[in-house]
Image (cartoon, rainbow, N blue to C red):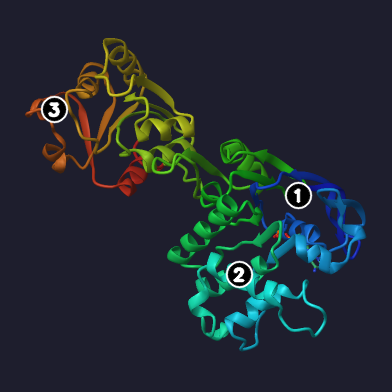
Amino acid sequence: MARLKIQSVTVAYDSVPVLRDFTLEIGEGELVGIIGPNGSGKTTLLRTIARLLKPLKGAVFVGELDLKSVSVREIARNIAVVPQEDVTLFALTVFDVVAMGRTAYCPPWGSLGKDDINAIEEAMAQTETEKLAMRVITELSGGERKRVMIARALAQRPRILLLDEPTANLDLKYQLEVIELIRRLNREHGTTVITVLHDLNLAPLIADKLVLMNSGGKIHALGTPEEVITQRNIQEAYGAPVVVSRNPLTGKPSVTLLERRIVLKPNLRIHLICGGGSAGEILSLLIRSGCDVSVGALNRGDSDWEAARALGATLIEEAPFMPISERAYRETCRAISQSEVVLITDVPFGFGNLLNLQAVIDAASGRVFIMRPKEFSGRDFTNGEATRLLRQIYSTKQVVELNNIQELIRLLSPSDNPT
Ligand code: ADP
């Protein structure tokens, strides 16, 4: 019924179009996040839906209702907006602010009726703002004020709730409150929610479906967070280098902005012995710097395996939780023999990954970098077997000890001695 249909809409400011021939359909009860770089038209889209802006061309429908043909009050009974900046400068009580949401239902200058009071009380209960009713809005915290603004919108009893960056400028605790509130409104009350979101890592936690806009005011991608937040989509739409991996705690895509490229020895072939997240930062540094990186052997699902996969390193894999097999050992030896440098991160060693150290002994012909070797015994869970192999590496290879990533950068910078 309350399907929202934005049909071939063109919107312009001073005849400069921001949205061009823009079409989007949102079903009843959906929770949709709008993401995209600054200036891509996200706020313009919300304002167009709420008919605060009139399109030059095209139409917006709520169900069968063409918003062009209905009154402002009728629109307000269907759609409510929580703007990014709350513009309440007056020292009104929270109750008065929430009551503003009833303007669309009250006769001009009329007093609040029973229905209005019910709607206000319900909106305050949903947003847990009842206790704040008699407080002055300007004296509340940012998070409380945001909840009051959402209450005001809910008092309109809208079918569609529009929010513009609801978590912007809020501390983590208040962000969480607002996120939980939005999701509850959607789940328990069936309200259709369309929200502009700034934080690409919060977006997949809030919305079930995402619309990624690009700087041309067009939809770049549309779908589930997993479909939309991909390295390619984000890099294309935002024009910034990122890596997208899967957040191990939430299972959702997670975006990491990459730093400026550091120039290391071009095309250096380096093999990493790592695991358990010990390589993430090193891996991304090496790959961004144009090194030819192989990694392994690593169990599928290991966080370094995830990182290597996301970054496109050559991976030697083993099945999850399985000790390194003969096959994986041989592949590791081959990768090591083709590398100028082997780097052993501060990964712990158990009987499952011990063969990686054996592979260094058997196949390394260049330098072997060892991260934080002084703490090695604390990472040895093999009754000293790993320590024995490490000693063998020290006695047979050209070992370089490293204490941090800066030392690695110094060693691999082009001014260093040739490898
Ligand atoms: P976003 O929300 O994605 O940052 P906006 O919808 O706010 O993008 O803005 C899209 C484009 O429209 C920008 O180039 C912006 O400068 C322009 N714009 C926004 N509001 C106005 C306005 N009131 N007058 C003129 N140009 C505007």
Numbered disc in front, either 2 or 3? 2
Return the residue nearer the eye: 203 or 324. 203
Q: Position of residue 376 (x, y in %)?
A: 15, 38
Q: CA distance from mark 2 to mark 1?
A: 21 Å
Q: Amino acid at mark 1?
A: Ala
Element carrying mark 3: helix
**Residue designated by label 3:** 386
Residue type highlighted by circle 2: Ala
Q: Which residue is mark 2?
A: 151
Counting residues from the N terminus, which is met first, the one under dot 3 or under dot 1?
A: 1
Residue at the image point whose x is 21% and y is 23% from the top = 352
Q: Residues within 10 Å of mark 1 (few under 14, many from 20)?
A: some
Location of residue 280 by image quarter = top left
Location of residue 349 with respect to 205 vertically, above or below: above
Whether residues under marks 2 and 3 lie with C-beta atoms below 8 angstroms apart, the answer is no
- Residue at figure coordinates x 51%, y 50% from the top left: 201
Q: Earlier in the sequence, mark 2 or mark 1?
A: 1
Residue at mark 1: 2
Q: Residue furthest bottom?
A: 91
Label 1 SS: loop
Residue 212 % position (x, y) = 67, 46
- Res. 199 visible in picture: no
| Left or right: 20 as drawn, with respect to 372 | right
Name the quadrant of the C terminus.
top left
Q: Secondary structure at mark 2?
A: helix
Along the viewing direction, whichever of 320 and 311 lies nearer the viewer: 320
* x 37%, y 29%: residue: 301
> In terms of image quarters, where does ligand 1 lie?
bottom right
